[in-house]
Image (cartoon, helix red, strand yellow):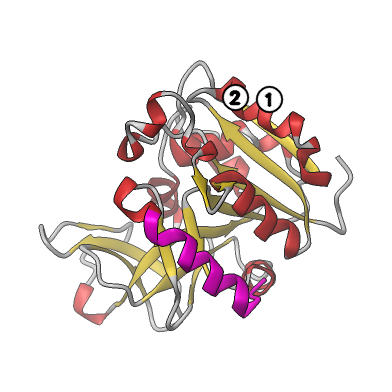
Amino acid sequence: MNVKTSKQAMIFAAGLGTRLKPLTDTMPKALVRVGGKTLLEHVVERLKGAGFEHIVVNVHHFSGMIVDYLRRNNDFGIDIRVSDETPALLDTGGGIKHAASLFDSDMPVLIHNVDIFSDINLTELYCAGMASDATLLVSRRTTSRYLLFDDDMTLVGWTNVETGEVRSPYAGLDVSKCRMYAFSGIHVFSPRLFSLMDTFPDKFGIMDFYLKICDKIRIRGMVKDGLRLMDVGKTDILSDAEAFLSQCNADGNN
């Protein structure tokens, strides 16, 4: 796969979409529509507009429907490849690992959830990701779970502020001295990390992977102040998503 001058991305579209029931009783989450377009088309268009020419889409729930949908739309005029997880869901880390052979080994991969809308400039994020092994888009959004960074915005751990749980490869990490940010579900992954996944099982979360190895490699956080982000994975959010997209598109952030 010769894509050495092209940007590449992966869209997580394999999930069961349980929060979107009953819609996902008969279709995959990726094909739920907002403003007349599927969630998958919205994300593909954003990536294509930012110059991404090679995209991997993982599939599981109603996988055949997504494959047929991409075929009917001629892969939206770019190189879209399917990573088939029909036999079993592999979670976010396992999904990336399973798709390894579909990526060029010399270029970063922008990872994007199919049910996340945002106004982030994807080109800017991708370029920033070239300087590290992984770059995580984060913001000051209020949540119960935060990623922990040092003063240089290097990932050092994770915490749940409601339970007090802390996860970090650094023993005795002082959370009070860390910078706390919420993860967006969008990040840039270097194929250099695939070899470090060899000891992981087929199914694992990407954040579990990052938290286990962040003392050995460079994982940075990219802060987007005022980031507009919408998780459209819930039925009560869908009605607001069209207006959100219209505003983001009007601002023209690629």
Which residue in the rendered view is the most extreme toward the front?
A: 36
Q: Could you say which quadrant of the image residue 51 lies in?
A: bottom right
The answer to whether the residues at label 1 and label 2 have Cβ atoms under 8 Å apart is: yes
Q: Magenta segment, which residues?
A: 239-254
Disc 1 target residue: 68
Nearest to the observer: residue 24 or residue 134: 24
145 in the magenta segment: no
> In the rendered view, does 195 fall on the left or right side of 93?
right
**Amino acid type of disc 1?**
Asp
**Amino acid type of disc 2?**
Met
Q: Can you see residue 14?
A: yes
Q: Main secondary structure of the magenta part?
A: helix
Label 1 to label 2: alpha-carbon separation? 5 Å
Which quadrant is home to the N terminus?
Answer: top right
Q: Which residue is drawn at the image coordinates 35% and 39% (left, top)? A: 20
Nearest to the observer: residue 118 or residue 1: 118
Q: Secondary structure at mark 2?
A: helix
Q: Which residue is drawn at the image coordinates 71% and 45% (left, top)? A: 55
Position in image of residue 176 (x %, y %): 20, 79
Q: Could you say which quadrant of the image residue 177 lies in?
A: bottom left
Position in image of residue 95 (x %, y %): 53, 35
Disc 2 target residue: 65
Q: Is residue 59 above or below residue 114?
A: above
Q: Residues within 10 Å of mark 1 (few under 14, many from 20)?
A: few
